[in-house]
């Protein structure tokens, strides 16, 4: 599989997808048309969302078409050279994928070898389930089971920041609760500006900031260019 799972669409105050353009370009070598899935978008129209992605990728010579422009969405997935899934609300994204009956079809196309790029919610769904998303469940998908391209959990936009006087749950507390109930399931937490890449059977962490690996009740730092073994533990 060829996966590029980005934490976010921006880092700091960057332009849209700008911090990741080199990774995206490398990932899409030989691809000149990309199928974009905007279903995570809630407060933006799909047309506007498409235009934003087109503007970001046009200088790279990549034509972007959105799945919402096709009368037959299954055919669009079946014929795609590569697939990109944008951020927004993960619950709404997965709900729409189930509604259109393309969860398994996307998985098949990607496992057959076409490149997949996700950011934020689009990265969330590449894991086994969406149970470690940060999003509010504004709609109920038929299942939390996602694409399961990797048998792990993803947590994009990761931060361990705790504002002074804040008494709600921190991100680490929420992930600790997941580990309590699912001790054997790895979670890879991606701070903004970082990514997880899979090529030629090798999974690698990309980014200047450290990522984090949660499993068996422990939190472990992941340095840039760290690779993972068959059990998805950092090596």
Image (cartoon, rainbow, N blue to C red):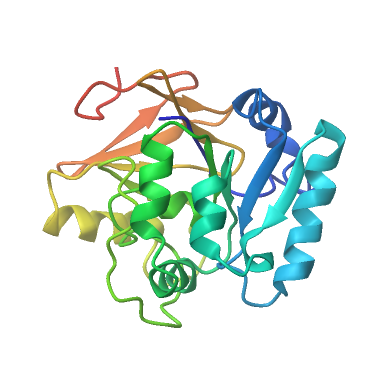
Q: Is residue 53 above or below residue 211?
A: below
Horizontally, is 74 left or right of 140 in the view? Answer: right
Displayed quadrant of residue 94? bottom left
Q: Is residue 145 above or below residue 232?
A: below
**Visible in this render: residue 211?**
yes
Residue ID at (69%, 66%) = 69
Q: In this orientation, which residue lies closer to the viewer: 147 or 73?
A: 73
The quarter in which the N terminus is drawn is: top left
Residue ID at (56%, 68%) = 39
In percent of width and height, residue 16 lies at 76, 49
**Visible in this render: residue 158?**
no
Residue ID at (25%, 21%) = 229
Q: In this orientation, which residue lies closer to the viewer: 149 or 76?
A: 76
In percent of width and height, residue 195 lies at 52, 35
> Residue furthest toward the bottom?
139
Residue ID at (36%, 36%) = 111
Horizontally, is 54 left or right of 68 in the view? Answer: right
Horizontally, is 163 left or right of 145 in the view? Answer: right
In percent of width and height, residue 215 lies at 21, 41
Q: In this orientation, which residue lies closer to the viewer: 110 or 130?
A: 110
Q: Is residue 218 above or below residue 91?
A: above
The quarter in which the C terminus is drawn is: top left
In percent of width and height, residue 83 lies at 56, 45
Labels in figure, total: 0
């Amino acid at each position: 599989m060829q996966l590029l799972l980005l934490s976010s669409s921006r880092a700091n105050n960057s332009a849209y997808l700008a911090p990741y353009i080199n990774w995206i370009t490398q990932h899409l070598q030989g691809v000149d048309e990309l199928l974009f899935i905007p279903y995570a978008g809630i407060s933006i129209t799909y047309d506007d969302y498409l235009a934003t992605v087109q503007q970001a990728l046009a200088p790279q010579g990549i034509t972007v078409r959105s799945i919402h422009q096709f009368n037959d969405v299954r055919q669009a997935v079946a014929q795609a050279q590569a697939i990109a899934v944008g951020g927004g609300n993960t619950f709404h994204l997965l709900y729409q994928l189930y509604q259109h009956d393309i969860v398994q079809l996307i998985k098949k196309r990607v496992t057959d070898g076409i490149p997949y790029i996700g950011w934020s919610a689009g990265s969330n769904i590449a894991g086994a389930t969406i149970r470690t998303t940060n999003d509010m469940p504004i709609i109920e998908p038929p299942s939390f089971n996602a694409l399961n391209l990797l048998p792990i959990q993803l947590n994009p936009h990761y931060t361990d920041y705790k504002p002074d006087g804040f008494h709600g749950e921190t991100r680490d507390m929420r992930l600790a609760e997941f580990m309590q109930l699912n001790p054997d399931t790895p979670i890879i937490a991606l701070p903004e500006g970082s990514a997880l890449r899979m090529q030629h059977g090798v999974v690698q962490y990309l980014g200047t900031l450290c990522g984090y690996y949660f499993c068996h009740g422990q939190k472990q730092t992941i340095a840039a260019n760290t690779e993972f073994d068959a059990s998805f533990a950092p090596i």
